Amino acid sequence: MSALDLEKLRMSGAGKAIAVLTSGGDAQGMNAAVRAVTRMGIYVGANVFHIYEGYEGLVEGGDCIKQASWLSVSNIIQLGGTIIGSARCKAFTTHEGRLSAAFNLVQHGITNLCVIGGDGSLTGANIFRKEWGGLLEELVKEEKITEDVAAKYSHLNIVGLVGSIDNDFCGTDMTIGTDSALHRIMEVIDAITTTAQSHQRTFVLEVMGRHCGYLALVSALASGADWLFIPESPPEEGWEDIMCSRLGEGRSRGSRLNIIIIAEGAIDQNGEPITSNYVKELVVQRLGFDTRVTVLGHVQRGGTPSAFDRVLSSKMGMEAVIALMEANADTPACVVSLSGNQSVRLPLMECVQVTKDVQKAMKEKKFEEAIQLRGRSFENNWNIYKLLAHQKPSEEKSNFNIAILNVGAPAAGMNAAVRSAVRIGISEGHNIYTVNDGFEGLSKGQINEVSWHDVAGWLGRGGSMLGTKRTIPKTCMKNIVENIRKYNIHALLVIGGFEAYEGVLQLVEAREHYEELCIIMCVIPATISNNVPGTDFSIGSDTAVNAAMESCDRIKQSASGTKRRVFIVETMGGYCGYLATVAGIAVGADAAYIYEDTFNIHDLKSNVEHLTEKMKTDIQRGLVLRNEKCHEYYTTDFLYNLYSAEGKDIFDCRTNVLGHLQQGGAPTPFDRNYGTKLGVKAMVWISEKLRESYRRDQSTKTSVV
């Protein structure tokens, strides 16, 4: 949304009242959503109310409904759970309960309600909206409100935000809390992997997902689990023999551990539960492996929300307020969903119905239909997991040689992309080579053929296992051509940032001089700066944002403890302000200076004045983010000196340059999953182009003969 569009919204809500509540199970990111609804509501001029303890507070009224201010939601974006509480309320399921709720809303002049919860909570909100007119009529008859009041508040607008760690709501790519839950799961899996390798153990991990296997599926994909159980796709008859055989094969090839992931709602073909203890006993009895069970439980709901969830919740909360401002008496209840990278509005009850259809299909044992109803993303994840979990003999040998290399700066998730590309290439029957140290390694002949098991254990590794350099082809073109000829390379898969784009472009431009370069080439974007064209996300950027966010969380904590302190934090990104912008949203920074949004001394003065006023409140700390090349002259040192001078006797100032810590660390679940998907997509595309080229060549040869 442009600044002009935002300005048009300012004061559009004057005279209106908005209430927000959280209901059902808590999910990390709910606080960020409450914060966004509150502040966007205040921005548009509305009175904003928090309803405490969900629908229970709505029915009880009184102190459970409180007007919120801008400062009411300060310093909550990093908190898990929900500060306004959540409770399951039987009273609201009754007519009398909803009548009380309507009276309590009218008492505060509230006709706009934002509900953050699961499908049950949102369904309840829609029933409430449909009954609203009748409820007001009853209140008039009971002389609790006047006819004038009933006429003034004649319709109720409802907007839903889906808060559920299970990602079990159809109509949105991701629900609030899912990414954070995956973070908790992957932290446990990474920790367990090290001890399992030490003792050659098998671990059975049970994750949440009573009716939806999303958490189990994505964590299995992101960890390279040996076996997976999800309720949407029960294993075939005789799965016990197949699983034990596969686990045994892995150990015979030198693997020191096995990871089995099971959703708590996993079932067999007959609908009978498959428990983690049953799987453990099976492995012990059949294989004699030292096996342990870990049930993650509510740890998946806990902890601080990830950067993705904070930004997602902020986007959705803002969109929810805009939707409420635009609603009228004829507007149906909507749910704010995520489609790709954009917030969209969908009819609430249509999404609820599809979600119910999934449960119906599973009860009727129509499991393929259930997977399709879950959505394209779920089905894609499931198909990719099946492709990568176990090596299957290729139908035929292609004799195509494909080389994979990393170029530019390291980015977390590169290894996941290499792993999936290698394994899909081998499944397609190709000979796969990896190149060490990018184009420089290609010029020096640092080329090795790899097998399926050579890339085992790469998913959770940060950096680049192949090594990566910024060298571009024009400095060593002849040697690159010579090695492409020597190894008879038919296709190149280059994973990297701007240098990867530039390098492949140089190879393409050199085709007129070197016939050997007339080969298939594909680039997978991987850069923490997220500064390359053609994609909303590049591999590594999510991990980098989370690294910056975690550092800023600690810095905010330090500033809050010290009082009257402002931190100026410099992020990486070159001339791209993505890291500073997204990290700024995720941590609730007071300002973010980026190259793309020009600023001057007047803007700096305004920000200093804002922080000066802020120090007079209870929130006596400040955080300012600066993209490393946001301005030629307004450097980090300049900002430090300016803020220190202008804030003298009001606040003191500190600087922190995050530097290369943003490139390090284990990749996030998002980057592991994203890198895996892009690796598969790239190799499938390369395979199609190679076969097309081969058929075209064969056709040409036949016609010549």
Image (tube, rainbow, N blue to C red):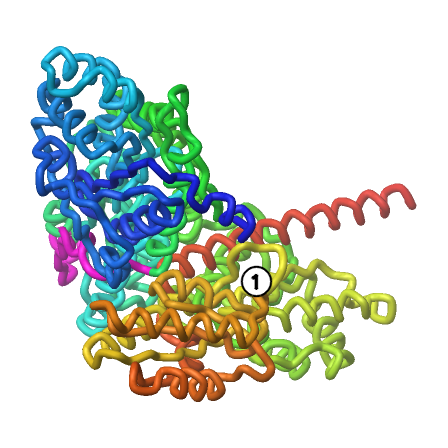
Residue 135 x/y as whole percent: 19, 17
In this view of the protein, which residue sits in the foreground, 222 or 151?
Answer: 151
Check disc 1 and report its element: helix, strand or loop.
strand
Q: Residue furthest top?
A: 141
Magenta part of the chain: 284-306
User: Label 1 sits on what residue type?
Assistant: Pro
Q: Which residue is mark 1?
A: 525
The part of the image, by quadrant, that contains residue 53 is: top left
User: Does 472 sit left or right of 164 as displayed?
Assistant: right
Residue 326 x/y as whole percent: 44, 32
Is residue 185 visible from the viewing direction of this image?
no
Q: Is residue 303 magenta?
A: yes
Q: Is residue 544 magenta?
A: no
Residue, x 60% and y 76% (percent of image)?
Answer: 438
Residue, x 45% and y 70% (percent of image)?
Answer: 606
Give the vertical position of 330 relative to 650 (above or below): above
Q: Tell me the quadrant of the picture where the C terminus can be found.
A: top right
